[in-house]
Image (cartoon, rainbow, N blue to C red):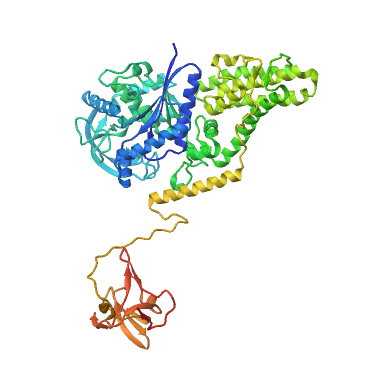
Amino acid sequence: MAKKFYMTTAIAYTSGKPHIGNTYEAILADSIARFKRLQGYEVFLQTGTDEHGQKIEEKAAAKGISPKAFVDEVAGEIKSIWDLVGTSYDKFIRTTDADHEKQVQKIFKKLYDQGDIYKGHYEGMYCTPCESFFTASQLVDGKCPDCGRECKPAQEEAYFLKLSNYTDRLIEHINTHPEFIQPESRKNEMMNNFLLPGLQDLCVSRTSFKWGVPVSFDEKHVVYVWIDALSNYITGIGYDCDGNSTEQFNKFWPADLHLIGKDILRFHTIYWPIMLMALGVPLPKQIFGHPWLLQGGEKMSKSKGNVLYADDLAKVFGVDAVRYFVLHEMPFDNDGVITWELLVERCNSDLANTLGNLVNRTISMSNKYFGGVVTNANVCEPVDDELKALATETRAKVEAKMEQLRVADAMTEIFTLYKRCNKYIDETMPWALAKDETKQERLQTVLYNLIESICIATNLLAPFMPETAAKIFAQLNTKARNIEDLSTFGLYPNGNKVTETPEILFARLDLNEVLAIAEELKKAQAAEYAKEMGLPVEGEKEEEPVIDIEKKPEITYDDFAKLQFQVGEIIACEEVKKSKKLLCSQVKIGSEVKQIVSGIKAHYSAEEMVGKKVMVLVNLKPATLAGIVSEGMILCAEGIDGELALMTPEKKMPAGAEIA
């Protein structure tokens, strides 16, 4: 009977398209799940989307659609990206699934009934993007300690989970299960920064928004994100709060591995275990908080224009190249760095040169010298021993690294074998053996050793680069093996025939061409962000606002003909004493000078007015304003914000020119 292995990713928040740092987790989980399947485990991999909360309610409102329509769209995009990168999940859960929401309500009610949840009031600083409350002392420079954004004061009635009821029990569990929180540094952070100083009770409901699972017995409240989101790990496999859980739940729980980002470690290693303790459900066996993937050393942000998306990268490099990079370049417990330059370098050196060139020239030599037929003539020399030893030892090395979740190190072991194959070619020089008729059987043996070593390495590579492994197997005309067979050298069928025309697995990339693509993507991203934020888009003409005003009654041409408009030149101007609004201008119109009083002091100074040519209604009946006679009207346009602008001729016109 196969051993079971249940693992989960954190569910992705449906506030927008996930970047490559988010997608890395799905790729990492998939590689672990595939490797476990290779080892013979019955694996259940669950991923999905977190779809409730204030942030989503606000984003949906901004788009003028319902929250459900909004999350349907984003969840679909997340699922398509997970599919694009080859995530072999067994369940994609959404927290808007009806069966999940029903269990969330039952869980909340059970915890309330047994006294672990109580009603109170919350007052503190609230971060909307993180959907978290903080005390003033928890803020960092007055901002959210998790994301660094602005927090706003908030006060509302809420239900709370009594964390203190289970704190001592959780501390004991962590101390007696050293594997529970990984890496070790994450465990120390949780113990020293949160558990040992003492926990505040956790806010688990909200009343300030509606987009959430209603509390069944108090419907002005919705269940706060953490009970809703975290419980997906058990509801997705059939947990029932009333004790009628499915066979699947009883089979797979407790989870063998929760794979999450280090930024949500507190919720998974403190709040989630306490919820499970309160429910009487066993704790997961291990929670691994992986590091972040940073763009050039910085967190990815649309506002910085440095966000990389998996689909964009896959178009340039291919899916497996992206998988290789994020898995191989991410350290075990420190943040990793991704840049376009590093991607090109890795693709050219590791994938095109080390792997692609090795497979291509080995198959090409087999075709050139023996018509593609691979024969083990067993004409061995001491130089063969090191290659064979490494080939048969690599499985154990990779398994040991994967047991510790050191995926990058496991991949390094596989590529060490590929590199040893390239060295073996240099040592044995097949092209020289081909020139000597007495060395034909030796040449056959050399090529057999290469193909057998490539097969072993590729079987181990398959969980990390499944498409590439499938292509190599097809070109070698062979199938994947059981992992037990990878410690035995010589299982490639004697007399088998490789493909006649090997496919180039990875073409070398030109850095300048890739950087040009990157620049175009960056511009497109900047334009998209500008539109989202209502900012002008660089290189795009800004759409000017329009104003609709109340229409006046129609007039005839005869009415219009009674009005006389001329160009006037302001030759002198001064402020009207005791008036906050008025300027008095001397306006030259032809050979005549008229005195005109205008209420534009808030928009123009007297000095600015002198020398301007303006549009003047000259036959307006004189009027007295603030004790000064005004003999006409200077025309202005009024903008949305009340700003006035003088109507001036586009071209040079003499004072007195008629406006018709």
| Furthest residue toward top | 1
Nearer to us in this view, 631 or 445: 445
Q: Quadrant of residue 493?
A: top right
| Furthest residue toward left | 217
Quarter of the image containing the C terminus?
bottom left
Relative vertical location of residue 373 with respect to residue 578 in this rendering, above or below: above
Q: Quadrant of residue 479?
A: top right
Give the residue displayed 31% in from the left and 34% down from the top. 225
Quarter of the image containing the N terminus?
top left
Q: Position of residue 654 (x, y in %)?
A: 41, 82
Q: Position of residue 378 (x, y in %)?
A: 71, 13
**55 displayed left or right of 436:** left
Nearer to us in this view, 85 or 400: 85
Relative vertical location of residue 16 with respect to residue 403 in this rendering, above or below: below
| Furthest residue toward bottom | 591
Relative vertical location of residue 577 with respect to residue 493 in this rendering, above or below: below
Q: Position of residue 46 (x, y in %)?
A: 40, 26
Give the residue displayed 39% in from the left and 42% down from the top. 140
Nearer to us in this view, 366 or 139: 366
Q: Position of residue 555 (x, y in %)?
A: 24, 74
